[in-house]
Image: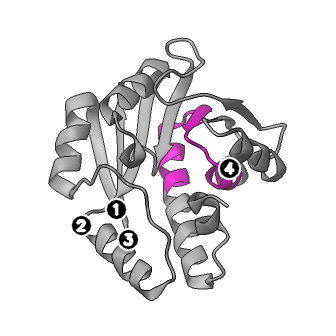
């Protein structure tokens, strides 16, 4: 079982409530853009897509992930009439330039060796908006270490750690008119390409 799947099937009602709030915030930000075509890069087992397709019935969604087994799981929980699932890597997405009004990467870029290259690829396939979320550091790392020590968390697998100032600088170096926000352990940035 992947750490992502473990996260979304965690038995704690408080933890699931926290994730729903996070997904609701993402849906609210997408709604404010009025985007109707949305690509989620690194969609994993499809939990974010399933939530968004329920909250935003006027949108068409595409999910892309490098792991076929995750996409197979996602196909069971995402509505096929509103969510298309495709295999692909964040470094070379199988879409033409400007294919989507909004491109989304939730909790993905901190796992990648070359996040700048992936962010450039997200920008390439977006016609207007890019929405990125990453963990709020150093708080996320400290809580993850505590969870590991207590035996209730799995290793996060992060290779990049952005505090608020570094995340703002990084997003502003790639996107225009960037809006920032927080949802407990997560930082969010919505900007134009």
Q: Which residue is mark 3?
A: 184
What x and y, as percent, mark residue 45?
A: 68, 51
Question: In the picture shown, does residue 1 fall above or below 38?
Answer: below
Q: Between disc 1 and disc 4, whose residue precedes? A: 4
Image point 59% across, 17% down: which residue? 95
Q: CA distance from mark 2 to mark 3?
A: 13 Å
- Does residue 57 belong to the magenta stretch? no
Helix or strand or loop: what does disc 3 sit on? loop
Q: Between disc 1 and disc 2, whose residue precedes? A: 2
Q: Which mark is residue 138?
A: 2
Give neighbour class at mark 4: few <14, some 14-19, many 20+ (Cα, 10 Å). many
Residue farthest top in this picture = 96
Q: Which residue is mark 4?
A: 46
Query: Is label 2 or label 3 in front?
Result: 2
Give neighbour class at mark 1: few <14, some 14-19, many 20+ (Cα, 10 Å). some
Helix or strand or loop: what does disc 4 sit on? loop
Q: Which mark is residue 182?
A: 1
Quarter containing the N terminus: bottom right
What x and y, as percent, mark residue 154?
A: 50, 70
Helix or strand or loop: what does disc 1 sit on? strand
- The image quadrant that residue 173 belongs to is top left
Query: Is label 1 or label 2 in front?
Result: 2
Q: CA distance from mark 1 to mark 4?
A: 22 Å
Proximity of marks 3 and 1: CB atoms separated by less than 8 Å: yes
The stretch in magenta equals: 26-52
Q: Between disc 4 and disc 2, whose residue precedes? A: 4
- Does residue 28 belong to the magenta stretch? yes
Residue farthest bottom in this picture = 150
């Amino acid at each position: 079982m992947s750490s992502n799947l473990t996260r979304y099937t965690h038995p704690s009602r408080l933890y699931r409530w926290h994730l729903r709030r996070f997904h609701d915030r993402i849906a609210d930000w997408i709604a404010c853009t009025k985007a109707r075509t949305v690509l989620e890069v690194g969609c994993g087992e499809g939990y974010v897509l399933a939530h968004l397709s329920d909250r935003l019935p006027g949108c068409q969604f595409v999910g892309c992930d490098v792991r076929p087994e995750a996409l197979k799981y996602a196909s069971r929980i995402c509505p096929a009439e509103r969510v298309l699932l495709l295999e692909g890597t964040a470094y070379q997405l199988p879409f033409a330039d400007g294919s989507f009004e909004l491109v989304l990467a939730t909790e993905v870029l901190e796992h990648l060796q070359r996040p700048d290259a992936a962010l450039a690829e997200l920008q390439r396939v977006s016609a207007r908006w890019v929405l990125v979320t990453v963990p709020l550091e150093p708080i996320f790392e400290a809580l993850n270490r505590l969870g590991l020590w207590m035996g209730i968390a799995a290793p996060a697998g992060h290779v990049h750690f952005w505090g608020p100032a570094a995340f703002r600088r990084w997003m502003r170096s790639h996107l225009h008119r960037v809006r920032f926000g927080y949802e407990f352990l997560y930082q969010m940035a919505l900007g134009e390409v």
